[in-house]
Image (tube, rainbow, N blue to C red):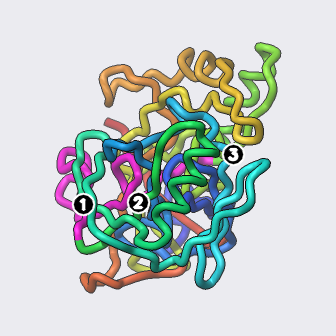
Amino acid sequence: MNDTAYDVQGQIAELWIYPVKSCAGIAVRQARLSRHGLQWDRHWMVVDAAGDFLTQRSHPRMALIRPELTDRHLLLHFPGLDSLEIPLQAQGALCPARIWKDRVQAWDLGAWAEPARQWLSQALETDCRLVRFDPDRPRQASERWAAGDEAPVHFADGYPLLVLSQSAVAELNRRLALSGAAAVDARRFRPNIVIAGLEAHDEDRVERLELLDLPGLSLRPCKPCTRCPIPDVDPDTAVPGSAVGREIRGYRQDARVDGAITFGMNAVVLGLPEAADAEALLQCGQRLGGNLSFD
């Protein structure tokens, strides 16, 4: 399809992965994309002694845990602590874990489980440990919103990707400035893909986002992302605030999710071959096009 056939066009401005659920993200220039989402995204998760997942909602200090990926290791950094190094392929026995309503069998880290438990418990000041996703036991996105599209997901809240327009953040910052509050960046909303060139929240209104440089591959925004207190946690200090939540409550009530506050769109991946290991390479600067849909 010719580019001019699209109602809106943009390009990938930022790519983010979050190797450990609810910890800091890593900005990358390129990333492998599968139906699960971006490679290494939410591949590990912090759980409490009962196996229940932890997030910044109750443990804002998680924002200060900074993951780093090397060719062979996951490194975790935290102010005042020596870095924790774990082999990327470390795995041990299967153990039960819970993420929202989903109960899964995840890997503990074998010989690295106890060092990780001690390190995380010191950083977060609570007894907790790290588990790794077992790709042979995939979760699936909600059938209601995935609408028949295959959408396996790792430890993300519920969908393979979160897509956000750069201009949505700019519009929020315009409103924050009018109320005397400080500007924020996209990190507050933990997107995987930030798109430049769209109008604010056009991601809400497109049927699909075709990757014009990867013919046949597209993203389907399928569910508005409902928002909790995490956008009010400063990613640099882990100090909770209130300005972001207060501002978006004033203009982002979404009838599609019974009036909940939303910002950004969860998305599924379409057009990859059926092979389980099928991947494509996303890169910053790649172009996208989409057609608007108005219900």
Asked if residue 139 lies in the magenta stretch, the reply is yes
On the image, the x and y values in percent for residue 142 come to 23, 48
Of 32 and 92, the residue lying toward us: 92
Of pointers 3 and 1, the one earlier in the residue sequence: 3
Q: Tag 1: residue type? A: Gln
Q: Which residues are magenta?
A: 137-165
On the image, the x and y values in percent for residue 10 come to 62, 59
Q: Are marks 1 and 2 in contact (CB under 8 Å)?
A: no
Q: Is residue 14 left or right of residue 47?
A: right
Q: Which residue has dot 1 on it?
A: 105
Q: Quadrant of residue 109?
A: bottom left
Q: Tag 3: residue type? A: Leu
Quadrant assignment for the C terminus: top left
Of 13 and 132, the residue lying toward us: 132
Asked if residue 235 lies in the magenta stretch, the reply is no
> Which mark, residue 64?
3
Mark 2 vs mark 3: in front: 2
Of pointers 1 and 2, the one earlier in the residue sequence: 1
On the image, the x and y values in percent for residue 106 come to 31, 62
CA–CA distance between discs 3 and 1? 27 Å
Q: Which residue has dot 2 on it?
A: 131
